[in-house]
Image (cartoon, rainbow, N blue to C red):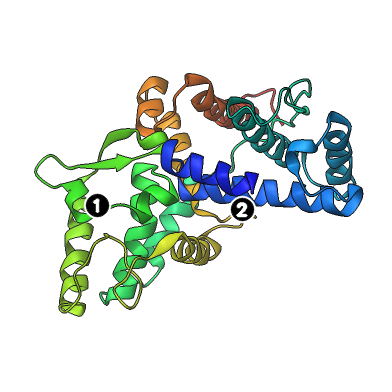
Amino acid sequence: MAINSFIRHIQSEKRYSEHTISAYQQDLTQFETFLNTQYELTKLEKATVQMIKSFVIELKTNNFSNRSINRKLSSLRSFYLYLLKENVIETSPVATLKSLKKSKDLPAFVPESDIEKLEFIEFGTHFEGLRDRLIFEILYQTGIRRTELTNLKDQNIDFSNSTIKVLGKRNKERIIPFLPALGNLIKEYQKVRDEKFQSIHIHYLIVNSKGNYGGSGLIYQRVNAILQKITSLKKTSPHVLRHTFATHLLNKGADLLAIKELLGHTSLEATQVYTHNTIEQLKKIHQQAHPKGN
């Protein structure tokens, strides 16, 4: 099947992350189901431009956002580009299609006043409590992605230099510094973890209650539970802490290029979105403080 061949390609040759591969697979499977249902077509390589346009219309009818639709179109573009290179098709049915206009939603972030509420949560000194606290703190204090944390190993942590080595998108490595308090928390957690699972060879920093690979699901659950206790934000995913990390650094005067490197962005454009949050913050301060304000 063409989808399976493409997935193997981005997994073994492109070495995309598990999260990205899963997204591609879901998007292509959804399109395949659409073709089967609407056109009784079983081969994606036979799809036409009009069929893809119909797919977009159905997505819009089902209230998918333009952002989500563009992601699915991006998956289709990559898939058909792969088929072109493999000489399976002569032209890509997505080549002439443009992305839909996206609304410029600002990245959601947790206000500093809400982050301060973390000290009132009783995590405890047992394994689960220390692990959950570490998950939250390491995401907020380093800005790493959820998948980067799930794949982080003890050997990636350099306590002598207070840095961690992260393997990001496209297998790109970056070094991120951490503060002494976070270093102490990591050591405390490792001590309790290793005592609890003495008979198990630990491969990853974050493990589940059985001492095995924690996975992204565990990270999401724990962060979501903690954020719901301290903030009224509707979005309570681990990615919100990445946005919070960048926004708080920028609000404190950090250089945009430095934040770009810490986040592992390939272009400055991806980092500049956080400047909008800072501008909105300045607008509020100006409105509240200026004599002519409300």
Disc 2 residue type (three-letter): Lys
Q: Is residue 205 above or below residue 249?
A: below
Question: Looking at the image, which residue is at 79% across and 49% down?
Answer: 42
The residue at 55%/64% (across/down) is 228
Local packing at callout 1 (Cα closer than 10 Å; few below 14, some 14-19, many 20+) is some
Give the labeled residue for mark 1. Answer: 182
Q: Residue furthest left?
A: 160
Measuring 69% from the left and 36% from the top, which residue is drawn there?
76
Q: In this picture, is 249 found above or below 164?
A: above
Task: Please identify the quarter of the rendering in which residue 90 is found.
Answer: top right
Which residue is at the front of the view, 258 or 31? 31
Amino acid carrying label 1: it is Leu
Q: Secondary structure at mark 1?
A: helix
* Disc 1 from disc 2: Cα separation: 25 Å
Examine the rendering and report whether any part of residue 7 can be seen: yes
For disc 2, the marked residue is 235
Q: Name the residue nearer the viewer: 62 or 243.
A: 62
Mark 2 or mark 1, which is nearer the start of the sequence?
1
Residues 262 and 124: in front is 262
Task: Find out whether the residues at labels 1 and 2 contact each other: C-beta distance under 8 Å.
Answer: no
- Residue 240 appears in view: no
Residue 44: percent from left, percent from top: 74, 42
Percent from the top left, x then y, of residue 292?
A: 69, 22
Q: Position of residue 264 (x, y in %)?
A: 39, 32
